[in-house]
Amino acid sequence: MTLLDWLVLIGTTAFIVGWGLWRTRGERDTASSYLRGDQDLRWPTIGLSVMATQASAITFLSVPGQAYEDGMRFVQFYFGLPLAMVIVSAIFVPIYYRLNVITAYEYLESRFDLKTRLLGAFLFLIQRGLASGITIYAPSIILSAIFGWPLEPTIIAMGALVILYTVTGGSKAVSQTQKQQMVVMLGGMVVAALVIVWRLPENVSFGRAVDVAGALGRMNVVSFDLDFQDRYNIWSGLTGGLFLSLSYFGTDQSQVGRYLSGRSITESRLGLLFNGVLKIPMQFLILFVGLLVFVFYQFNAPPLLFNQPLRAKVQATAQAGEFAALEEKWTRVQADKRAEAENYLAALDTRDASAEASAREQLQAAARAADSVRKEAKAVVSRALPGMETKDSDYIFISFVKDWMPSGLVGLLITVILAAAMSSIASELTALGATTTVDFYRRVVRRDASDHHILVASKLFTVFWGIVAVAFASFASLLDNLIQAVNILGSIFYGTVLGIFLVAFFLKHVRGNAVFLAALISQTTVIALFMFSGIGYLWFNVIGCALVVSLGLAIQAVMPRPASA
């Protein structure tokens, strides 16, 4: 990184954090204001805060890599989100406001009993505590790859900085800061897209870039195939995506805490609907940036391995010569692929359907040859370094930024990713600390604790969960793809939690014992399906929710009615 990159990175980050802390100075002197702010936020702040909480560093690292390797079909994951925002706004928000809760799980005790409240809170803590570890790991990859720092110390340093930022700021400072972070994130990705198009060869226009992507199977935005083992199609997006979004925005405290800080029900609803309108275009933009990177590398040779630290390790093994030979082969294959891409563009200009089809087949054959070399290289890595993860899609975008972005923009895009990391992790740690404090410590352990005692306890629990997240981050390198790992974790637990809340809202005759037992059976079943079946993970949300609702009804039907007074 150049001096200009450093100035952009440090200056933008310092401004964002300083602005948030300055705007909320003197407003965090009570436990309530620390945990949920002063409930005076307007809908634009709520909407951007909700988006920033979901758009972690993983989004900007992993989603472009997802598009590079698998095309645009991941956007279908979000097709159920707009409808979920309408449902959450209509049903969840008024109930939470009426009960004046800090966490969503307080409602479960008023509707059922204490054990159901604690079960819902516990499932959230497990899922979000693990996911926050992945969220810390993602930006650590950047610093490790760019500066050559050891990964483990980088994870610890990143975790410590975010813990300090979160504990110092509190809930309202997090919300205020996320506005600026979201603007920087979206602006940075738009700039990245423009620079990539500018970097393409002169004869490759924006439209021709889309043509090349389509010829190589990357413009696969919508699939109508009903395949339960396919993670991304319109059916899994509209059903599993809907249930996942309902669970995440309706029952996950990291999101509930964002919109409960609004000054009114109307402001919270507008913030959620704002997110529902903009989320799919935002994800499409980020995926499209990855698509443009893919097209760019059809005309410019990408590295054989995007994970450069892994490449360096291979070069120090007995397989170094074999890997070097593959890199030479890779260079030749890339030259052939560029020639075929140029031929395909020339064929498009002739408007000859037969010539276009022939050139497309040749381009696809060249792409398959390149993929074959990549597979050979990963096999060599596996032999050289047994047990190491060879999938490197999370390194694709940051590798492009480091190698091809102009000075200054490197700093801006690293700022984008670090801003996303800070916003998402801060929301997660705040929610984890609040849930532990409100639903367990204040409710079960110290019901008579003073406000100051609860304030201190909430900060200590936030630090505790930060340490847990850092510890789990050490294992994140074993995961296949970070964005999928986070969504899989959510899908394992969210369906059960959503089922509990739906029973609470709509099945008034079902009582606590029935829904508690149904939830335990549902969670056990979903974990078993995850471990032993090949079902796409989005369907776990539907299965988990359906099991809680159906089993809750069945168990309540056979349970004796309580004696009347």
Image (spheres, rainbow, N blue to C red):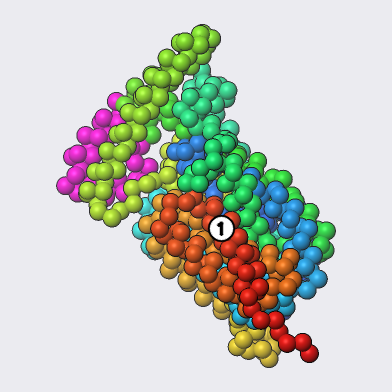
- How many badges with numbers are in the image? 1
Image location (x, y in percent) of residue 181: 63, 53
Image location (x, y in percent) of residue 553: 65, 68
Q: Residue at x 68, y 64 (%)?
A: 502
Please, what is the three-letter code of the amino acid marked with disc 1? Ile
Q: Residue at x 50, y 36 (%)?
A: 71
Q: Is residue 471 above or below residue 437?
A: above
Q: Residue at x 64, y 78 (%)?
A: 559
Image location (x, y in percent) of residue 509: 73, 73
Report the quarter where the C terminus lies. Answer: bottom right
Find numbered disc 1 in the image and state the secondary structure of the residue it sits on. Answer: helix
Query: Picture quarter containing residue 265?
Result: bottom right
**Which one is nearer the viewer's eye here, 151 or 262?**
262
Q: Is residue 91 left or right of residue 74?
A: right
Q: Which residues are magenta?
A: 303-332
Tell me, yes or no, whether the highlighted magenta stretch contains residue 305. Answer: yes
Q: Is residue 358 left or right of residue 238?
A: left
Query: Picture quarter containing residue 128?
Result: bottom right
Q: Is residue 310 above or below residue 174?
A: above
Q: Is residue 373 left or right of residue 466?
A: left
User: Residue placed farthest to the left in the image?
Assistant: 318
Query: Picture quarter containing residue 172?
Result: bottom right
Q: Is residue 15 shown to the viewer in this render?
A: no
Report the residue marked by disc 1: 543
Magenta-colored segment: predominant secondary structure: helix
Q: Is residue 522 shown to the viewer in this render?
A: yes
**Which one is nearer the viewer's eye here, 120 or 287?**
120
Image location (x, y in percent) of residue 491: 54, 58
**Which one is nearer the viewer's eye here, 388 or 203?**
388
Tell me, yes or no, whether the highlighted magenta stretch contains residue 104. Answer: no
Crowding near pointer 1: few (<14 within 10 Å), some, many (20+)? many
Q: Residue at x 59, y 51 (%)?
A: 240
